[in-house]
Structure formats: C-alpha cells, structure tokens
Amino acid sequence: MSHLHLPTPISKKFFTPGVIVLSVIALNGIIFLLGRFFFGIGSVTNLNDQFPWGIWIGLDVAAGVALAAGGFTTAALGHIMHRDKYETVIRPALLTAMLGYTFVATGVFVDIGRWYYIWHPLVMWNGNSALFEVGICVMIYVSVLYIEFLPIVTERFIDKVNLPGFLSRFNKIIDRLLRALDRGLSKTMFVFIIAGVVLSCLHQSSLGTLMIIAGPKMHPLWQTPILPLLFLLSAFSVGFPMVIAESLSASRSFGLKPETEVLSSLSKFIAPLLGIYLIGKLGDMVIRETFVYLAEINSISIMFGIEIIIGVIVPLRMFLSPEVRKSPTGLFIASMLVIFGVVMNRFNNFVTAYNPPYAVESYFPSFGEISVTLGFVAIEILMYRLFVMIFPVISIPSTKANIKTKYAIRGVAK
Amino acid sequence: MSQNRRDFLKTIAVIGASGTALSTVTPKKIKAAPENIISNERKGVLVDTTVCIGCRKCEWACKGAHDIEQGNYEDYQNDKSFETNRRPSAKSLTVVNQYFTEETPATIKLQCMHCDHPACVSACIVGAFTKVENGSVIWDTNKCIGCRYCMVACPFQVPSFEYEKALDPKIAKCDFCYERTKVGKLPACIEICPVEAMTYGKREDLILEAKRRIKNYPDRYYDHIFGEYEVGGTSWLYIAQKDLVSSVFPKLGNNPAPGVSESIQHGLFAYFVPPIAVYALLGGIMWLSKDRETKKENK
C-alpha cells in the first residue's frame, strides 16, 4: 500500500450553516413528536382505521432497515471474506448501521400506540408472527451493532480517560475496564460479526414477509410470496451504494479527498447485485402475469414504473460503465438512484400497494408525519457528524504506522 | 434408618408431584404461539338478512354490553345512518348498513366475523389475540403494544384503534360477548333482536339450518352461506337474498386468512436449521479466507 489510511477523529467545527438547517428540521420534528405523545397518534398523523400504517412504518422503519444494510454487507465483504482493502469503509458503514437501527427502533417506539409496552415482545412470543421475528431480530442486531462498535470506543479512550473534577479518581478503573473489554472483544468479535450478518439476512427477508398477510388488500404488482427474497436482494444491492454515498458526502462535508479508488472497486459489486434483484422482480411479474396492471396508467402503475426504471434499471446501467465507476460524481448519482429506488420500493410496498376493501379516501401523510420523518433523518445526520468527530471512524491519510494489528475491526493498520 | 427412608420417599414424592405439576403448567406457559382452538362445539351465529328490519337495537345493546356511551335508543330510529356505508369502530363495535337488492333495500349487521383461522391471531406480535374454544376471537389489553398489525392483516378490515388517545389506546372489535357467553348468557345483540334475525348455536347446526332454509325457500335466498368456507370458515354466517360478495363483503377465497405467511415464516425458521446453516457457512468462509492477503503477498 502506497499511502496509509488510519481511522481518526475528525477535528472540525461542529456548527456550519448546514448543521444549523438540520437542527431546525430536527427541532420541528421533535415538536410534532411531543404532540404525538401528549395528544395521541391521531392528533399528528393521517392514520385511521382504513390505513393503520403510514410513513412512520413504511419509511422510518422499513426503508430505514434497508438503508442500514451497508453495515452487514461491508462486514461480510471485509471481515468474513477478508477483502482487507475495503476496511476503510467498514467503520463508517458500521456507524451508519448502528445509528440507522437506533432510529428504526425509535421509529417503532413512536408509532406503536402503547409505547410503554415496547418490551412485551421480549417475553410474549408469537412464533407465527412475521412482525415478531422482525422485532426480535432487530433487537438482537442492535445489540450486536453496539458490541461491534465497542472496539472503536476502547481504541479512542484507552490511556485517554480523563474525567473532570472528583470523577478523576475513577480514571484508572475505567481504563482497566476498557482494556479488559478490548482484550475480550478481540478474541470473540468473530462470533458477533457472523451473528450480525445472519441476523441481518433473517430480518431483512422477514420484513418482506410482513405485508404478505395483508393478502388481497395489497396490490398484485407487489403482493407475491417471494417478497422475503425480493426484500433480501434489494437490501443486498443497496448496502454498497449507501456506503459510497455516505463516504462521498462525508469527505465533501469535512473537506477530505474522496476515497475514489476504494469506492470504485466497491461499486463493481453493485451492478451484479442489482441485476439479480431485477431478475427476481421481473421474473416474478412474468410468472404471476401481473404486467397486465401496467397497461392501465394510474398512480399505482406510475409508482411501480418509477421504482423499477429510475431506481433499478438506470443505476444498473450506470454501474456497468467504467467511466461512471471512476468519477466521484457518477458514483454519487448512481448510488443515490439505488437508494431512491429502495426507499421507493419500501414506500410502495407498505403505503402505495395497501388498499383496504372499505377505504373511503386514500392515505397521504400529514405535515406532522413528514416533519417527524425528516426530523429523524436530520438528527441521524447530526449524530453521525458528532460521532465521527469524537471517535476514530473515518480513515484519513496518515504518516504514523500503527503496529497494532489486532482484529480487523480496528481498521487498516499495516 | 427408617426415618431416612421416609425422607427419601418423601423427596421422591415431592419430585414426582412437582414433575406432574410442571408438565401440566409448562405447556400453557411456554407455548410460543397463541391458542387457536377449533372445537367442534364452537358456537356461531346465523344472520338471516332477509329477516332483519334495520331497527339498530343490536347497535344500542352492544354498546351497553361493552361500556360504550350508548345514548337513548330513540335516537337510533332514523334512516340517516343508512346514508353512509359505516364500518365497525371503537365507538360502535357493530353497525347496521343498508344495501340494495333488486327490488327492496335490505339491511345487514356487520361486526368481527370471528374467523376459524384468524389473521389477527397469526399476525399479532405479542399474541394478544386468541381464538377461544367457544368460537370467540378475543383481545387482551394487558399484552397489546398497539402496533396495529392486526388491522393490516384482517381481511374484513374490522379491528379499530383509538387514535385520539395518548395513553392506553385500545384495539376495539366485537368480542362475541365473551364475558356474557362465559356465564351462559346470549350475546347482547342476539338477545335484543326483536325479529330473531340472528340465531346463536353450534356452528355445524347453523350450517344445516341455513341449508334447510335455502332449500325450502329457493326464491327467498341466494344459494350461498357466506362464512361457511370463506377464509377457511368464520363463526358468523350470513344468508341473504343476493350474493353478498362485492356488494357487502370483499372477495376473499377459501384459504385461511393468514395465507402463506405462516408457512414462509416456519420455512425460514424450521427448527432454526436455516439460520444455523447460514452461520456455519459464513464461519467457514471466514476461516478459509483468513490467509487470503498473506497468500497473495507470498506469490
């Protein structure tokens, strides 16, 4: 390797004009969120007995889970297949997944009517329920993500614990604790890494099983018994685009040189993955003969068209082109299209396709619902910024050679 | 010595007793999925819509039986409510709607159908729904987390949610007057019906009765018992002058409402073999590719 990349906390000013805009969006979301807790779900959302699930489930949870797929796909590539050159992107992807899943859990928490009973699925099991499976897997996976992040915390604070005032007497104890944790984790981390990938595959697919029980309420363009497979395949194909888009935005935001070399070789995997997903999607359509619904031009068929053409076929073609894969702009646009496509797909599955038999009017999210969703996204970006400034997540060129080559999760250190 | 032997026997007895106790208690306690008893003795209701006069006394009585503000019965006696196609809700667990046959308007009472294989029971994340032995599908307020997946799942679009409540919102639906039938009373709507449009009894007897009526009065009834086979059978059965499907009920087919979701779910998790196999496979790949980079360098 010609130049060394070392994960380092970014030292930049936290508040920039962009951060202030995000804070305003976040605050607006929080205000509506408070309304939901004080006056009920009905006071903030447009949900009713006909449409029990809206964008809080369709976007915050379903799309959120998919977009956090960068965590397990890069872990599989970097740690399980040991492609060491991708290690610079593993930590950012891990952080994105960790924050993403935290917000998925928060999204569930605000959407359920009896939020104080959110712990119930831990003790009250219903093995027949797809939702139960998703719930349990996500809960375990969030814990696994936090464990996977712990080595980054120990790396940051070992020898650097410096509590203010009278708390300083705990410095030594905490340091020793961190060291013990670090030693233990470096030997057992592989258990959690594999578990993370298995859990992800399980709940990404079960998320697709969720809407199957809605039966004829769901439009045939989306209602298919292979939904679990399609959800898993689309999660696979959105993982790397998320990593690329997020790495490019971060390097732009912090004024760093984009890691084009790593990202463009990572992007080689995307076209084949998207291709497999497209084959599944179109093959299913041919076998079930649902293409007849595309003949009638209405909001349903238009949404389906956008999802497939702009969200899958266009980026698939883009990722096949070497010029696109070499340019940061091309990579960014193509990646954003894949992300858009998967978000559309989740939205379509959970919102567009859902048409109950006695619907009087169709569902459109209220201003409050949209505010909360945007607020969550804003808070997540702000948290990401905060985390990469505190913890060594983003790799920047370094002259220091790190001799510690413990476990791969520590990042590139050769 | 004898003392010891008695102690020994006592211990054995205690172990044996606790074993028996465990075997009787544990299956109930650790059962993962909620119960779904399809008893041959299960009750049902035969609704003969040709008899119903649309007096809406059943709506009034239902509210009384479920502690819902019911108001004066006189207020129910106007035809205004027939102008809109109402749905059961938290404020009225059953509603009477008007629909049109060829000659005359007819009225039909709607409420939870109490499916034999309920989608809500299958879907509920915490098992708050139960199909009990007498046919009722009931909901447990102490389990429900308010996720509303039951509403997504129900093919008849029945469960309702109290969206306006910040604390303790309920999933509301007809519970077949479980509290009343438990003590031998009739469901409130059936007890009050002045024209006996509804017959309460063993489900299989009701089907025989429905068939008899259809056979004896072919001019009066359309030859179909709604609920006999729909979504795998429901406890509430309807006979009417014309086909109720599409004018009143959605077209649903005869497969149980949980559909293929349960088989997919159990396929993906069959005895945890698939997840463990994936885990082993990934572990193997991880182990084999461990020296990948060093090998490359040595070449």
Image (cartoon, rainbow, N blue to C red):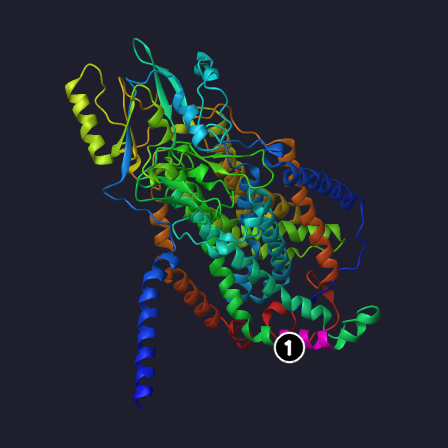
- Residue at the bottom extreme of this rendering: B1
The residue where tag 1 is placed is A180
Q: Quadrant of residue B258?
A: top left
Identity of the residue drawn at 57% across and 29% down: A364
- Which kind of residue does numbered mark 1 sit on? Ala
Q: Nearer the viewer, residue A128 or A309?
A: A128
Q: Find the residue positioned furthest to the left.
A: B216
Q: Chain of mark 1?
A: A
Q: Position of residue A107 (x, y in %)?
A: 59, 46
Q: Nearer the viewer, residue B93 or A42?
A: B93
Q: Quick check: B26 above or below A60?
A: below
* x then y, percent, for residue A92: 64, 58
Image quadrant assignment for residue B217: top left
Which SS does the magenta portion mostly show?
helix
Q: Residue at x 34, y 53 (%)?
A: B267
For the magenta stretch, what is the residue range? A173-183
Relative to A39, is A170 above or below? below
**How far from the left and from the top, in percent, is residue A157?**
73, 70
| Residue A323: x %, y % from top left | 60, 48
Q: Is residue A175 magenta?
A: yes
Q: Secondary structure at mark 1?
A: helix
Which quarter shows the C terminus of chain A? bottom right
Q: Residue furthest right?
A: A165
In which quadrant will I find the N terminus of chain A?
Answer: bottom right
Residue B27 belongs to magenta span: no
Decide which of B78, B237 is in the foreground and name it: B78
- In this view, the residue in front, A199 or B299, is A199
CA neighbours of label 1 inside 10 A, class few (<14), some (14 to 19), many (20+): few
